[in-house]
Amino acid sequence: MKIIPNDNILPKTIDIKNSQPDPDPAKKNSFNKILEETLVNASINNNKIQKPISAGNLSAIQTSQFTVIDKKSNVQNLEQLIDLIDEYQKKLSNPTYTLKNLDSQVNQMQSKQEELNKILKKLPGSELKELFNHTLVTSSLEIMKFNSGAYN
C-alpha cells in the first residue's frame, strides 16, 4: 500500500503570521485601564465579607428519573416468578393436567416476565441482576417451548 501525502491538497492562500493586524494602540491602552480598575476594585472588595449567593428554590429539580430501586420488592417479584416456574414444572409432570389447563399458568409467567424485564433494565450490574437474567431466560425458554407445541 502506498501512502500519498496530503499536504498540498489546499493551496496556502493566507499567511497566518501576516494575516493578523496589529491591535490599535488606543484600544490596547483602554483594555489595560479597565484591567487595572478591575484589579483595584477586586482588592478593595476582598476585604469585605460577602454573602453567599443563594441557589434559589431547589424544589424545581426533577429527581424522578433517579429512583432508588427497592431490592426487597425486586427479590419478591423474582421469587414470585420462580414459584410460578416451579408450579408450572409440577403441573407439567402431572398427567392429570392438560395443556389447556397449563395455558393460564404460562400466561401468568409471561406477564410476570414482562414486569421483571422492566426491572432488569434498571438494575446495576450485580449478582441480583445475574439471577434476574438467568430466571428470565429460563421462563422465556419454557414459554417458547409451550407455545411452539414441544409438549404435545
Image (cartoon, helix red, strand yellow):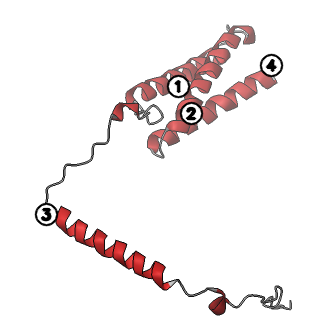
Ranked by sequence position, the earlier of labels 2 and 1 is 1
Instruction: Find residue 22 and report its horizontal and vertical position in percent.
Output: 56, 88
Instruction: Find residue 52 and report its horizontal and vertical position in percent.
Output: 22, 49
Marks 2 and 1, how far apart in space?
A: 7 Å
Instruction: Find residue 3 and report its horizontal and vertical position in percent.
Output: 82, 90
Q: Secondary structure at mark 3?
A: loop
Ranked by sequence position, the earlier of labels 3 and 4 is 3
Ranked by sequence position, the earlier of labels 3 and 1 is 3
- Report crowding for label 1: few under 14, some 14 to 19, many 20 or more residues within 10 A (C-alpha): some
Q: Is residue 2 left or right of residue 32?
A: right
Q: Which residue does the image show at 18% across and 53% down from the upper left?
A: 50
Q: Which residue does the image show at 56% across and 17% down from the upper left?
A: 87
Read off the residue under disc 2: 135
- Report crowding for label 3: few under 14, some 14 to 19, many 20 or more residues within 10 A (C-alpha): few
> Do the numbered discs 2 and 1 sit on residues whose CB atoms are within 8 Å?
yes
> Do the numbered discs 1 and 4 sit on residues whose CB atoms are within 8 Å?
no
- Which numbered mark, 3 or 2, is in the foreground of this view? 3
Ranked by sequence position, the earlier of labels 3 and 2 is 3
Read off the residue under disc 1: 82
Q: Which residue does the image show at 53% across and 31% down from the upper left?
A: 119
Amino acid identity at mark 1: Ile
**Residue 152: mark:** 4
Ranked by sequence position, the earlier of labels 1 and 4 is 1
- Which numbered mark, 1 or 4, is in the foreground of this view? 1
Read off the residue under disc 3: 47
Please state, as top left, top right, bottom left or bottom right, where the C terminus lies in the image.
top right
Q: Is the residue 118 above or below the residue 89 in the image?
A: below
Marks 3 and 4, how far apart in space?
A: 88 Å
